[in-house]
Amino acid sequence: MSASAQLERLRAELGADAVLTEPEQCAPYLSDHRQLFHGRALAVVRPGDTAQVARLLRVCEAQRIGVVPQGGNTSYCGGATPDASGTQVVVLLERLDSIRHVDAASHALTAEAGCTLASVQAAAAQAGRLFPLSLGSEGSCQIGGNLATNAGGTQVLRYGMMRDLVLGLEVVLADGRILDSLSALRKDNTGYDVKSLFLGSEGTLGIITAAALKLFPAPRRHATALVALSDVQAAVALLMRLGEATDDRLSAFELIPRAALELTLRHLPGLTDPFTQAYPWYVLCECAGSVPDETLQVALQEALTAALEGGIVLDAALVRSERERGALWRMREGIPTAQRAAGVGMKHDVSLPVGRLAEFVTRAAAWVAEHVPDGRLVAYGHVGDGNLHFNIQALPAADPAVFLARSGQVQRAIHDLVHEFGGSFSAEHGIGQLKVAELERYGDAVELEVMRALKRTLDPHQILNPGKVLRLP
Ligand code: FAD
Ligand code: MLT
Ligand code: ZN
């Protein structure tokens, strides 16, 4: 079938309005948000419900048309960007945006894939519940994208990653069959956990159209502090202490280096340094609880006082109002935005055993100082989960092209060191098209074979997000 006949077929299935082909309409969906990847497409399509996604995939499989699912297009590895052939179809899930059901008693919510994360959080809050996944991109990323990337964020320490927040899924398979595993049951040991295959599969095994998600009691109190420290070793020591002192009600523990704080103060409006002097490292820590009294604040304050007296902590600023709390979180979540505003950088989303973080940072920082003299290390992140965004920001005087030309070599050195330390080269951002070679280099050979076998079984004609995550020989 010719390209124009294929387009006619898509229009017949989805309606003419749901098939975009004009260059200016399609442009926003053909590049990733960092502008690292650019593609072309036969069309950008906007199915309106699960049945239309199923019909679309039946046509695409029959015609061997590559299909690239796209949610909020906020991911970091180019997973939602089509290739350069101009033959693939980008599938937007944005019209599947209903909250189908909220069951406060069962602590469950069923949302369609195109709901933004923020809208799911709001629906849970309206029912007096918490949906805990929290990302800086939550206003625009979508639940389908969060599931497909197994997103992490700032609350993983307490509530787990997206994978841990899923009860059921509805998925359209490559041949258009609808897999209905949308039950919100807590206990269901009936054979293999098939739905879990789609979590973190980045659109390569099926298109997720809806999910039943876990909710939690809404916290009524938060105790939050920005803590100043001399090094990463002290941050890890503080993590252990706070976990014990707060009876494991620690919900966030985010490492922030001075370089990151300075970037946010310079590039984001309305932020001030809570301290009167500069410190090398900070931790934004937060405890959350349902008891509406001062217990948590007292526990956090006492633990921080003891850590100050014990020389682990250099200084601490406890939050006294929701306004102060909001400002600290704006600062933390604004780090990626501030980094972009400051110019080009190299990103490494790595995880390590928590006990080896400090040693890793010492070794990796020394390597960066020697080999990337025109860059400044901005290593921050979800240290409570062993996850560091080990980023290197180009200094203002650096030539961006010269700086970026070394990204591959720098990435290899950092990832080799991560591997030596028993860590992961992709903690929460996935593989996409950016890290396919890394997965081949560091992945377990047998696990890769199993992944390829699953891909061949579920997508025999390789129409689902071709070239992402895995290369099939
Ligand atoms: P997209 O970028 O649209 O797609 C991501 C992948 O999922 C692609 O491979 C796509 O094909 C696939 N996909 C999308 N929808 C579906 C579907 N319905 N079915 C099947 N496949 C699908 N990530 C974190 O993990 N932690 C963070 O703390 C974090 N912070 C961020 C902060 C900022 C400021 C930004 C810009 C990004 C951040 N991210 C973070 C990255 C990003 O927001 C997440 O990866 C998010 O889960 C992507 O969702 P999305 O809807 O934008 O997906
Ligand atoms: C974050 O934690 O801020 C993100 O995952 C990292 C990023 O956006 O670069
Ligand atoms: Zn992160």
Image: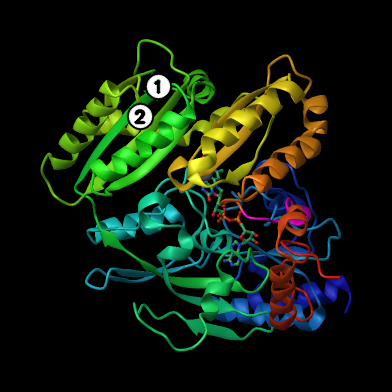
- Classify 288 as above or below 21: above
Quarter holding residue 164: bottom left
Highlighted magenta segment, given as a residue range: 430-437
First-in-chain label (1 vs 2): 1
Q: Please give left or right for residue 409 compared with residue 382 in the image.
A: right
Amino acid under label 1?
Gly
How crowded pointer 1 is (Cα within 10 Å; few <14, some 14-19, many 20+) is rated as: few
Q: Are marks 1 and 2 in contact (CB under 8 Å)?
A: yes
Amino acid under label 2?
Ala
- Residue 329 visible in the picture: no
Q: Which mark is residue 270?
A: 1
Calculate the distance from the C-alpha at mark 1 to the C-alpha at mark 2. Answer: 8 Å
- Residue 173 visible in the picture: yes
Element under disc 2: helix
Report the quarter where the C terminus lies. Answer: bottom right
Element under disc 1: loop
